[in-house]
Image (spheres, helix red, strand yellow):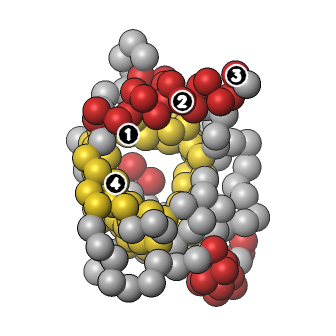
């Protein structure tokens, strides 16, 4: 019951800060099976051996800067996230029901731990109450063109990355061309 109260409180806090776009969707939204198929293909390309070693990759704080396409998962059929060098981001997700959701705010990387932690905050990080509107996640570079972010539903950092790359708490990102 406490988890339900937390989710309800989180949603009520986020409503005024979200820009919600609804439009008629002419294409058919991807269902979970289509997302699973696309992610299965992606996972085949990104075996654990292909994950960049820290010493061979650019610093993650520099690497993530730019526009990234969100690959379909069980939450959304498409979208993007833009990470700026100044610690701000903007994210757009098109949910499977055709609803579009845009969020903006700050992000913080903690690269002093393994796996690297990321806070994706709605509006400002480290302010009173921001823990209720922050996605706590872990992030890794799979290549200079692919990132994986895994968050959790319980407001804590996940301890590891999910094997299910299409779950609603995993964002597979591909650098926008």
Res 2 label: 3
Callout 3 environment at 10 Å: few (<14), some (14 to 19), or many (20+)? few
Q: Secondary structure at mark 4?
A: strand
**Closest to the observer: 143 or 131?**
131
Does residue 53 sit above or below 11 in this rendering? below
Q: Is residue 147 above or below residue 32?
A: above
Mark before the other along the chain sequence, 1 or 4: 4
How far apart are labels 1 and 2 at the CA level?
Answer: 23 Å
Judge whether residue 24 can be spotted in this image. Answer: yes
Q: Residues within 10 Å of mark 2 (few under 14, many from 20)?
A: few
Residue indicated by mark 1: 107
Find disc 4 in the rendering and name its residue.
Answer: 101
| Position of 123 relative to 97 (above/below) | above
Please tell me which of labels 3 and 4 falls first in the chain: 3
Q: Is residue 83 visible?
A: no
Residue 130: % across, % down: 42, 23
Among the two numbered marks 3 and 1 on one chain, the one whose residue lies closer to the N terminus: 3
Residue 92 image offset from top left, x and y in percent: 33, 58
């Amino acid at each position: 019951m406490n988890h339900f109260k937390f989710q309800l409180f989180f949603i009520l806090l986020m409503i005024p800060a979200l820009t919600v776009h609804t439009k008629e969707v002419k294409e058919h939204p991807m269902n979970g099976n289509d997302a699973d198929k696309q992610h299965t293909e992606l996972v085949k390309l990104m075996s654990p051996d292909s994950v960049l070693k820290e010493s061979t990759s650019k610093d993650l704080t520099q690497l993530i800067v730019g526009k990234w396409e969100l690959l379909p998962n069980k939450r959304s059929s498409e979208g993007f996230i833009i990470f700026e060098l100044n610690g701000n981001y903007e994210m757009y997700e098109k949910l499977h029901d055709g609803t579009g959701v845009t969020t903006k705010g700050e992000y913080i990387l903690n690269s002093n731990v393994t796996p690297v932690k990321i806070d994706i905050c709605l509006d400002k990080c480290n302010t009173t109450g921001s823990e209720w509107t922050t996605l706590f996640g872990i992030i890794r570079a799979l290549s200079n063109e692919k990132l994986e972010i895994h968050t959790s539903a319980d407001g804590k950092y996940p301890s590891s990355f999910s094997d299910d790359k299409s779950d609603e708490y995993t964002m597979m990102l591909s650098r926008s061309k």
